[in-house]
Amino acid sequence: MKQFKPYIPADKVMPELTPTSVILGIILAIVFGGANAYLGLRVGMTVSASIPAAVLSMGIVRMIMRRDSILENNMVQTIGSAGESLAAGAIFTLPTLFMWADENPDIKPPSFLMIAFVAICGGLIGVLFMIPLRTALIVEEHGTLPFPEGTACAEVLLAGETGGHKSMQVFSGLGISAVYKFIADGLHLFPSEIAWTIPAYKGSGFGMDVLPALVGVGYICGAKVASYLLSGAVLGWFVIMPLLVLVGGNNILFPASVPIHELSVDQLWGNYVRYIGAGAVAAGGIFSLLKSFPLIASTFAKALKGFGHTDGNSRTSKDIPLPYAIGGILIVAFGLSAFPNIPINPVTSILIIIFGFFFATVSARMVGVVGSSNNPVSGMAIATLLFATILLKQAGIAGYRGMTSAICIGTVICIIAAMAGDTSQDLKTGYIVGATPYLQQIGELIGSIASGLAIGGVLYLLNAAWGYGSTELPAPQATLMKMVVEGVMNGNLPWGLVIVGICIAVVVEILGIPVLPFAIGLYLPIYLTVPIMIGGLIRLFVEKRRFADEGSRETVRNNGILFSSGMIAGEGLVGILLAILAVFGVSDRINLGLMGFHLGKWGGCLFFLALLFSMIYMIHKTKDKQSSNNTL
C-alpha cells in the first residue's frame, strides 16, 4: 500500500500553536459555541464549525494579518470548532435542570460554576479519549474512513494555500451556498424544509431539507453510504409509521397523548420512530465497538510498548503521551465527584469512564462515515440516560436526586461523544495537511476550557431571556431527555419501542449491512437523509457517466469534493450569522415571509433544482477548463 505523505512534510517545522492561533481560536470557539447553543435550542440541531472556522482563519490570518502558515490556520479551526461540539453536547441535556427548577419552586437552578465545570470535564475527557484512538482511526484507516468534514476542511485549507483553480472551486461553492442559505433561512423567501404526506398511504411522509450543506455531505460520503442512511429512513417513514396507523387506529400509545390516527407524520416519528432509532443506534454502537476492539487493543498495546522510547518518531506522529492522557481522564472523572452540588460519586465516575470510552470510540468512527453534522449525539445521550437512570434507581437513588445525577452523567457522556467526534475530524484535517498531533490535542483542550466557561453564561442568559420549553426556545432534545429520565424513574418508558430498534439492528447486522449508517438513517428524520442521498447520486452520476478512465474520474471526484466543501462552509457561516442576528432580534426585520413575499414549497423545489444544476455545471466547467489547458 502506498504510504500517505502529508502536505507539510514531517521534517519541516512551521508556526502552529502560537499566541495568534490560540487567541483567535478561543474567540471563534466562544462565538460558534454561543451561536450553536441558540440554534440547537431553537431547532434541535447544530451546524459543524470546523470548516467555517477554517474559512474565517484563512480570511483573518492569511489575508488580513498576512501570515502564511497553513498549520497555524489549522490550529485556529481546531480550537474554534471545539465550541460548537461542546455546545451541542451541553444543550441536549443541561436545560432539563432549568426546566425542573421552573416546575418546582423548591428546586434551585444549576449554578454557573456547576454548568461550566461539568461541560469542561466532558470536553477534556472527550479529547483525551481520542489520543490512544488516533493511530487506529486516523492513520491506519486513512483510506477506509472518509471523515467528510475533516477531509473537506483540509481541502479548504489547501485551497487557500495553493490558490488558483482549487481556491476558486471552494469559494464558488461557498458563495453560492451562502447566498442560497441567506435567501432560504434569512429572508425566508421559501421554506428550507419541504414535506408531503401521502393520503392513500396514511402515516407515511416524504420531504427534504432543500439546503446545500446536506447535498455536500452526500457528495463527499458517496452514494453507497448515503443509500444506507436512506434505507433506515425508508423503513421508519414508509413501513413502521404506516403500520402504526394501520394497527393503532383510535388507540392511545404512550408517549403520545392522543389517538394514533390523529398524529401527524412528524409526531409519529417524534413519539415512536425516534425511540426505535435510539435503540438501533445504541445496538449499532455496541456492534461497532465489538468489531473495533481488536484494532483498539492493538493500538493500546503499541502505545504501551512505546513508553520511554522515541523510536525515531517524526513530528507528525507524536501524540500527548498515553500515561498523561490516562492520568488526565482519571483525575478529571473523579474530580467531578469532589465538586460541590454535582450529584456524582466515585462509582458513577467509573460509569462515566466506561460509557465515555464506549461512546467516544463509536462517535469517532461514526463521524468518519457520516460527518459531525449528522453525529446522533442525542441518540447516544438517550442510551446513556436509559442505563444510568436504571442503575441509579436500582441502587436506591431515586426521585429528583436520581434524575439530576442521571442528567449530569448524561451531559458528561454527551459532551464526550460530541468532542471525540469533533477531535477526530480535526485530527484527520491535521493528518492531511501535516500538523503536529500533540499540538492539535493541546489546542482541543484549550478550546474545551474556553467553550465550557462560555456555555455556562450562554445557557443562563438564554434561560433568563425566554426560558427553556418556551415558544422561542422549545429545546426539543432536552425535552426528550427530560421525558426519558422521568419515564424510567416513574416506570412508564416505552421500552418496547427501544427493544424493537435493538432487534432491527440485529437483523441488519445478520444481513451484512453496516448497522450504524442504517440506524442513523432510522433515527434522523427523512428530511435530512433525502438530500444526502441526492448528493451521493450526483457524485455517482459525474463519475460513472462522464468519465471512463480512473484519472479523469479522480479529477472530477476531487473537484466535486472541493465544491461540496465550499457549500458546507457557506451554509455553516451564514447559519451562524443568522443565529447571531436572531439573538439580537434582527431576524424579523429581514424576514420577507412576514411581508407576504413567500414562494412556498414549490418555489423551494425550484431553487433546490437550480442549486443542483449549478453544482453539476461548476464541476464540469472546471474540468473542461483543465482539459483545454492540458491541450495547449
Image (cartoon, rainbow, N blue to C red):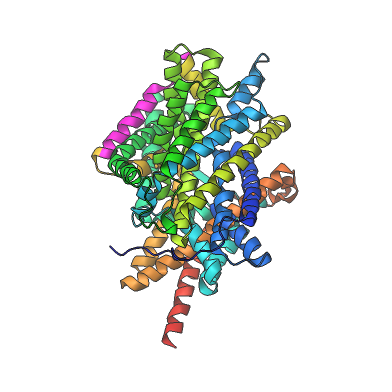
Q: Is residue 497 magenta?
A: yes
**Which residue is located at x 38 percent, y 46 percent?**
308
Tell me residue 109's x, y (percent): 66, 23
Vertical placement of 210 versus 419: above or below?
A: below
- Whether residue 16 appears in magenta in the rendering, the answer is no
125 vs 464, nearest the viewer: 125
Q: Main secondary structure of the magenta part?
A: helix
Percent coordinates x, y for residue 2 in the rendering: 30, 65
Q: Position of residue 524 (x, y in %)?
A: 45, 40
Of residues 459 and 242, the one nearer the viewer is 459
Note whether residue 524 is visible. no
The furthest residue to the front: 308
Q: Nearer the viewer, residue 157 or 185?
A: 157
The answer to whether residue 261 of the structure is visible from this angle is yes
Q: Is residue 108 above or below residue 517?
A: above
Q: Position of residue 314 (x, y in %)?
A: 41, 59
Examine the rendered structure and indicate whether residue 596 appears above or below residue 174.
above
What segment carries the magenta color? 490-509
Residue 342's place in the image compared with 628, above or below, is above
- Please state, as top left, top right, bottom left or bottom right, where the C terminus lies in the image: bottom left
Q: Nearer the viewer, residue 614 or 89?
A: 89
Residue for point 39% across, 26% down:
497
Residue 160: quarter of image:
bottom right
Q: Quadrant of the N terminus?
A: bottom left
